[in-house]
Amino acid sequence: MKSYSGFSLFAQSFLAHRRWPRAWRDPEPKKHYDVVIIGAGGHGLATAYYLSRYQGVKNVAVLEKDYLGGGNTGRNTQVSRSNYFYPQSGAFYEHSLRLFENLAQEINFNVMFSQRGILAVCNSRHELELYRRWANAIRMNGIDSEMLSRDDIKKLAPYINLDCRFPICGGFIQNRGGISRHDAVSWGYARQASAAGVDIVQQCEVTGMETTDSRVTAVQTSRGTITADRFALCVAGNSSHLAAMAGLRLPITSICLQAMVTEPVRPIFDTVMMSARIHVYVSQSDRGELIIGGGADLYNSYAQRGSLNTHHDNFSALLELLPVFSRLRLMRHWAGVCDMAYDVSPIVGKTAVENLYISTGWGTGGYKAIPAGGDTLAYTIANDQPHDLLKPFQLDRFDTGRLVDEGAASGVAH
C-alpha cells in the first residue's frame, strides 16, 4: 500500500485523480478465521486494525450487513473529549483523545481533527457550582479543564446571547477537545486494516450463531457459514439482537439520538458549545454547516430518522443562545441508535460465552471512544484478559454492583 502524501496528491493531479488505487480490498469471505468481528463501524474497524498492527493477529474478518461506516459512525456529531467525572471514565477517554491527537499520522489519513475546545455553559448559580465540582474532578484526574467567566465566554463565542431566557453565569472548557471527520476515521482504519490482511466483508449479514459447550463455533451469514476461534460484537444499536443469538441477555436499551445540520455558512463559530439547561449542543463543521443536537429520545426505538418535535426543540434552544443563526435553513437530519447501559457507561470485554467478546453500551459516547475502544478490545481478544483501562467496564459489574454512573457527563439527557 502506497502512503498518501503531498507528493502523491500532486502527481495524481496530472492524471485527473483517476489512478488512485482502491483504499481497501473487497474480498470473498473465507471459511475460517482466527477472529471474526461483527460490525464494520468505527469500533469494529479499529479493533481489526489494532489486532493486526499491534497484537499480531492477521487472520481477521470484519463482517458488515450493509456498507462500512454506515451505522452510528456515520450518524453522530463528531465530538471527541475526555472531560468525564469519574477516574475510570476519565482515564479511558483521555487515552482515546490522545490517540485521536496522533491518529492522522498513525493511519496515514487526514481525519481533520480540530481541537477547538469543548465549552459547557452554566445557566444558573447552582449549575455553576456543580460544574466547578466537575471541572475540579477532571483536573484531579490529570485532564485539562478551565473555568470561564461570562466575559471569557463572550470572547470565545462573540455571537452568544449571554442574557438569554436562563442567563449565562459562566462555564468551563476542555481546550484539547474538539471534532474530527467521522467518515475519515472509519475509512482510515479500514484502509490500514485491509492492507494488513484483514478481510472487510460488506453486504454480509449475520443471521445466526452456532454454539456448543458455552462457545460460539460459527456464524451463519447471508454469504455462507464462517467459523472462527474467537468472535467479537461491535454492533451499536443491534447488540441485544446479536447477543441473543449466543444466548446472552444484555443490561442495555436501544434509543435514538437525533442530530441535524444547517446549510453551510462562513466559519464564525470556532468551538463546540453545550448547554444542559437550555438543552442543546452545537459546532460548525469544516464545510461550514452547523451541527446541532440535544437530548436522546425518551422511548426505545431502532428508527434512524429525525422527528419534527425534536427539530423544533433543538432549534428553539439554539436560537436562545445564538439568535444570529435564526435565518439558516435545515439541510438534513438523522438519528443514531444508541445502546444505553443502565449506568450510562460502556460494556467492553469478555462475556459468559467463552470465546465471545463485546463492545456495547456506549450510549452517546461511542464516536469519541473509537480509538481507545479498538485498542483495548484488541488487547483483550488477543490476550483473553481485559485491558487495564477496561477492568471497570466489564459485564459482570452488574452482578457485583460496581457501577460507573456517568449519566451527567454525557452532556445530554437520557
Image: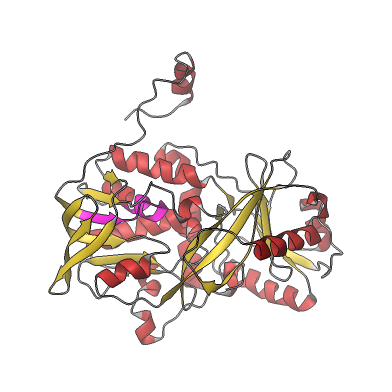
Q: Left of 312 or right of it: where is 257? A: left
How many numbered discs?
0
* Front in this rendered view, residue 187 or 249: 249
Q: Is residue 19 above or below residue 395?
A: above
Residue that appears at 69% across and 43% down? 263
Q: Which of the 4 image quadrants contains residue 299? A: bottom right
In depth, the one of 326 and 5 nearer the eye is 326
Magenta-span inclusion, residue 223: no
Residue 330 appears left or right of 233? right
Q: Which residues are magenta?
A: 35-47
- Please say if 103 is above or below 240: above
Please state the horizontal and vertical placement of residue 146, each as a whole percent of the image.
68, 62
**Residue 350 showing in the rendered view:** no
- The answer to if 40 sits in the magenta stretch is yes
The x, y position of residue 213, in whole percent, is: 12, 74
Image location (x, y in percent) of residue 191: 36, 39
